[in-house]
Image (tube, rainbow, N blue to C red):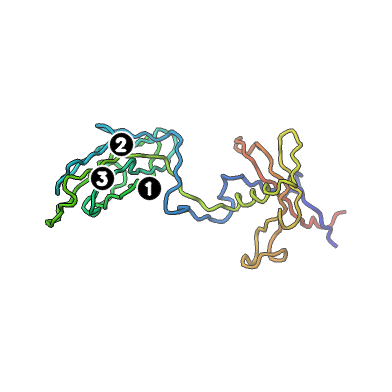
Amino acid sequence: MKDKKIIILSIVGVLLLVSIVVATSYAYFTANVSGNKDTNNVVITNGVMALEYTDGDEINLANAIPGSSVSKTFTVKNTGNVATNYTIYFSELSNKFVDKTDLVYTLTSSDGGKSVAQTQVPSTNEAMVSNYAIEAGKTHTYILTIKFLNKDENQNDNMNVSFTTKIGINESVEYKEPGNADQIAELATKDTTNFVTDDKDNNIRYIGANPNNYVYFNCSDYSNQSDSTCEKWRIIGVFKNMTKEDGSKEDLVKIIRDDSLGNIA
């Protein structure tokens, strides 16, 4: 009869080690869905994007008549050393047009930026380009043109009104659904009443009860996850600043499970 032993992941020779990188590693598990958290992009700024203008940052279409237009040339440069994404948006926009459909914009780029065909100018600050990729050290040059359309009809309501805006840019990131690593880390850290954090490295030892600190892997039937259809692993702690094989350091989640070691002489 086989003896059941708990395999502790850190024991060399009998280890079944799964080190899960907290918050950064999605590749170890199933594919994740990327997308926007809501209708707006989640935008962050970390100082790696540069926006330059040829003649100031404001666009002003004053006392306009049908057929009037104004253009602005600007560049977006990735000053960092890794590829990133950016969002270009209308900033401090003031649109006094009565019939909003009379005012349109186009955005053109000939060196890798994203062009936008003729589109109605919004009434509030909105993105022109969302989450567009740019390589490290690259520059994208843009021409933004705002035009008061001549519709060959009575447009007196919009005669001599004004439009002003500035152009803003931020590095942008897509909202990403939490992956398995994130979810495991959350399970391992959510119950503060069951922490033991008295070691010198401030590691978190989780001593919660099944099923709060357990996770399933390698299920034969993922629609019916249970002890009989999956491997059940127990989350035992979050270990701070652990050294990985490549020499980098990460916070890691450690897990263990019951398994058979076979007959022991």
Q: Give the residue number, with chain letter if any, for mark 3.
A: 108
Q: Quote the CA–CA distance across marks 2 and 1.
A: 16 Å
Residue appearing at x 63%, y 39% in the figure = 244
Left/right of residue 182 with respect to residue 205 in the rendered view:
left
Residue appearing at x 42%, y 54% in the figure = 39
Residue 220 in the image: above or below residue 156: below
- Which of the two discs, 2 and 1, labels the residue nearer the N terminus? 2
Quarter where residue 152 is shown: bottom left
Residue type at mark 1?
Ser
- Which of the two discs, 3 and 2, labels the residue nearer the N terminus? 2
Q: Give the residue number, with chain letter if any, for mark 1.
A: 130
Q: Give the residue number, with chain letter if any, for mark 2.
A: 75
User: 242 or 188, which lies in front?
Assistant: 188
Q: Secondary structure at mark 1?
A: strand
- Which of the two discs, 3 and 1, labels the residue nearer the N terminus? 3
Quarter where residue 212 is shown: bottom right
Determine the residue located farthest toward the front in the rendered image.
157
Q: Quote the CA–CA distance across marks 3 and 1.
A: 15 Å
Q: Secondary structure at mark 2?
A: strand
Measuring from the top left, give residue 253's x and y in whole percent.
67, 46
Label 2 environment density (alpha carbons within 10 Å; few <14, some 14–19, many ≥20): some
Q: Quote the CA–CA distance across marks 3 and 2.
A: 11 Å
Measuring from the top left, give residue 85's x and y in whole percent.
41, 43
Q: Mark 2 and mark 3 in contact (Cβ < 8 Å)?
A: no
Residue type at mark 3?
Thr
Query: Considering the image in quadrants, where does the N terminus appear?
Result: bottom right
Residue type at mark 2?
Thr
Q: Mark 1 and mark 3 in contact (Cβ < 8 Å)?
A: no
